[in-house]
Amino acid sequence: MAEFQVHPTAIVGNNVTIGAGTEIGPYCVIEDDVTIGENNILGSHLVIGRYTNIGNHNRFYPFSTIGLQPQDLKFDDEKTVLEIGDHNTFREHVTLHRGTGHGGGVTRIGSHNLVMVSAHVAHDCLVGDHVILSHAATLAGHVLVGNHATVGAYSGVHQFCRVGDYAFIGGYSVITQDALPYIKSVGNRAKAYGINTIGLERKGFTKEEITNLKDAYRTLFQRKLRLVEAQEVVTKKYSDCARVKYLLDFIAASERGIVRM
């Protein structure tokens, strides 16, 4: 495997590890104590902040800042990290900030994600796999985003909120509570608009799974039952459906409340 390539105009700090096959483009700045895995492509004019750990096969487009200090007034330049997995794409002008000491110390981006132009991931966020953050989508601090979720263009997610697996947040939305898995959350302030049927079909969900989720959604939110009563009904009816169980567990674990109709 070929050794890594560093453009002559790039600046690489001390204690930096660069894997084989990685290309670092013109005018990049790599700060001290950074680890970059194999076969990554760093376009021109990138800044990679200190204590950033990058996996393999990622592509970074120009003018992004990756792993700089968080925008948190309590941050006191303590050692915290940004961790990035494999096979991610980060488009132009993306900003990813490392964690804070009081928030767990790590911002983590999983694998196979697409982060579009001007998107922002703040300190202590945990982003799963196969996630899409559309143009200028913004995650405030401590946000958790599940696998296969989509956050639409120009949407903002409030600090400490969760976005469930396979959730779909429409463009220009404001999320101030937990966005439910499998469900479309749209608007300012966001409301729930039912199961994302087409999206789940594209992800390989069976007809039975989608039917079960639709029935669970109707029971939870469209019938004249208190939420706790509806949860009991759905739990008994779909005790053997893992998709519905995850939805129920997500609701039960909520601390900020959930996006509803």
Image (spheres, grey):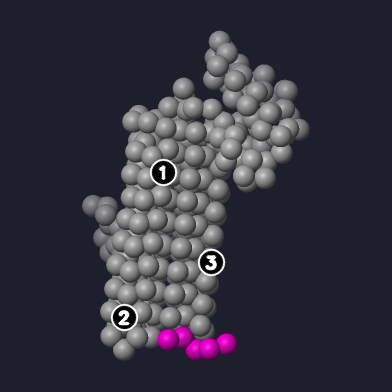
Q: Residue 190 occupies which quadrant of the picture?
A: top left
Q: Is residue 147 above or below residue 201?
A: below
Residue 140 in the figure: left or right of residue 147: left
Direction left: furthest residue: 73
Q: Disc 2 and disc 1: Cα gap in Å?
A: 31 Å
Question: At 59% from the left edge and 25% from the top edge, which residue is drawn?
Answer: 217
By secondary structure, the bulk of the magenta-drawn segment is best described as loop
**Percent x, y for residue 40?**
47, 75
**Magenta region: which residues?**
1-5
**Percent x, y for residue 172?**
34, 38
Question: At 54% from the left edge and 60% from the top edge, which residue is drawn?
Answer: 112
Q: Nearer the viewer, residue 45 or 74?
A: 45
Residue on which disc 2 sits: 26
- Is any part of residue 100 visible from this angle? no
Residue type marked 2? Pro
Q: Residues within 10 Å of mark 3 (few under 14, many from 20)?
A: many
Asked which secondary structure carries label 2, the reply is: loop
Q: Are marks 3 and 2 in contact (CB under 8 Å)?
A: no
Q: Disc 3 and disc 2: Cα gap in Å?
A: 23 Å
Question: At 54% from the left edge and 54% from the top edge, which residue is drawn?
Answer: 130
Q: Earlier in the sequence, mark 3 or mark 2?
A: 2
Residue on which disc 1 sits: 152
**Percent x, y for residue 188?**
34, 31
Residue on which disc 3 sits: 86
Question: At 36% from the left edge and 79% from the top edge, which residue is drawn?
Answer: 25
Residue 257: within the magenta? no
